[in-house]
Image: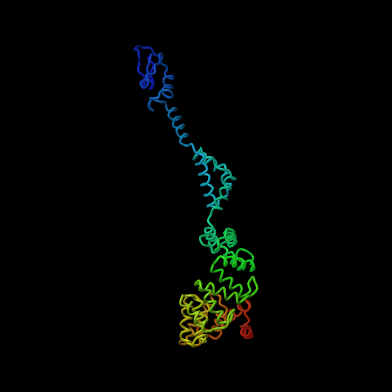
Amino acid sequence: MVRRKGPVWEHYNSVNSGNDPHPHVRCKYCSKDFQRAVPERMQAHLDKKCPKAPNNAKSKFSQQNTSSIIDNLNDRISEEEQKSLETLLSKALNSAEVSSSFVDNPLVIQFFQRLRPSFKLPNREVVNIIQTDDNDQLKSSDIHHLAYCYRYGIGTEKNEFKAFELYKKATDRGHVDSIYNLGECYYNGTGVEKNESKAFELYKDAAEKGYIKSIHQLGNCYQHGVGTEKNEIKAFELYKKAAEKDHLNSLHDLGYCYQHEIGIKKDEPKAFKIYKEAAQKGFVKSIHQLGYCYQYGIGTEKNEFKAFELYKEAAGKGDVDSMYLLGNCYRNGTGTEKNEFKAFELYKAAAEKGDVGSKFKLGECYYNGMGVEKNKVKAFELYKELIENGYIGCYGRTTELLKKK
């Protein structure tokens, strides 16, 4: 029986003929001679030694092994790329707020070994160092904007404590917007215990750096003695300084100083002129105050019609004080035709925004049936709420209602 030859023989030429099972053969690709043909040696030559042997001449094992070697060569990673990937991974974990213990998880380690064997997953300490460096490299303005988002719940859950911490971090780097906002946190007790002295010092620091809002707020502190000794002259000077830089709130407060003799001699015509300037620039509080000047003839000739129009304009812009006074205008027919229904609607709108005077007037509307059906139960509820919040103006009305129960 003749033994069947395997595929390796196709890549060799017989040098001598005959029926010898181990003839003299020569490789077709490199002329390597085998005096005694042995298939295993012939295949080994094609797999490892013949430089010109095509892939189809090599065994499947050899092809797989070669492919694996090539893959390993291609997967080699430089030190620079290793550090770059470590940094990228650490920043991604930091951005997603994932703990650095992530890299110690056995399943994570196994995943990266399969994904990129040559990449050495950094340990937790390396990740922490990179994340710390990354946070330090954040721009102060970015930290400030992030604080703002936490403070007002923009794009994230509201967190005043985090906002305070971030404002403090940016303040330590000298970011002037954050110095002012940190002062606001201390002034209002936002994310920290209220501390008017610290608020004053921060406003002063930012004001000295030319921050206009702080110049105004520092004036407010001096006017009312917040975190410092009261000094109306300094308040006036600071309002004037910020007003000259076109800060409308300061311009309005400068008018208020002239109207009420705060740090300067009383000058109602000048106050009126300043309110008018700020009102023309769209400052809502000044629109309201200008209306008040026209209603009572402060620094100008009395004009109830103009007062009504200005209250209406400011109320349309959401000014609660103007809603209340506009309600009074409709109730009493001041500068307009009397309309109790409109008065009721305005008192109700302002009361819903928390205006105490409007809540009392709303109670009066329900008590007397003015602009709405009489409802003494609702009137009593409003008076009771006001009393509980320290408003004593409706004790008499509440007592009267209780007697009738």
Query: Is 336 situated above or below 218?
Result: below
Image height check: is 222 above or below 326?
A: above
Q: Residue at x 46, y 31 (%)?
A: 69
Q: Quadrant of the N terminus?
A: top left
Q: How many marks?
A: 0
Q: Position of residue 73 (x, y in %)?
A: 47, 34
Residue 166 vs 365, above or below: the answer is above
Asked where in the image residue 384 lies, by quadrant, the reply is: bottom right
- Which corner quadrant holds the C terminus? bottom right
Residue drawn 57% across the image and 42% down it:
106
State the scheme by which the image is colored.
rainbow
Would you identify the image quadrant in which residue 169 lies? Answer: bottom right
Q: Position of residue 153 (x, y in %)?
A: 53, 62
Report whether residue 326 is seen.
no
How far across and how far down the image is residue 75, in percent? Answer: 47, 37
Q: Judge whether residue 154 can be spotted in this image.
A: yes
Outermost left residue = 17
The quarter of the displayed image where residue 10 is located: top left
Where is 365 relative to 211, above or below?
A: below
| Front residue (pair 165, 63) | 165
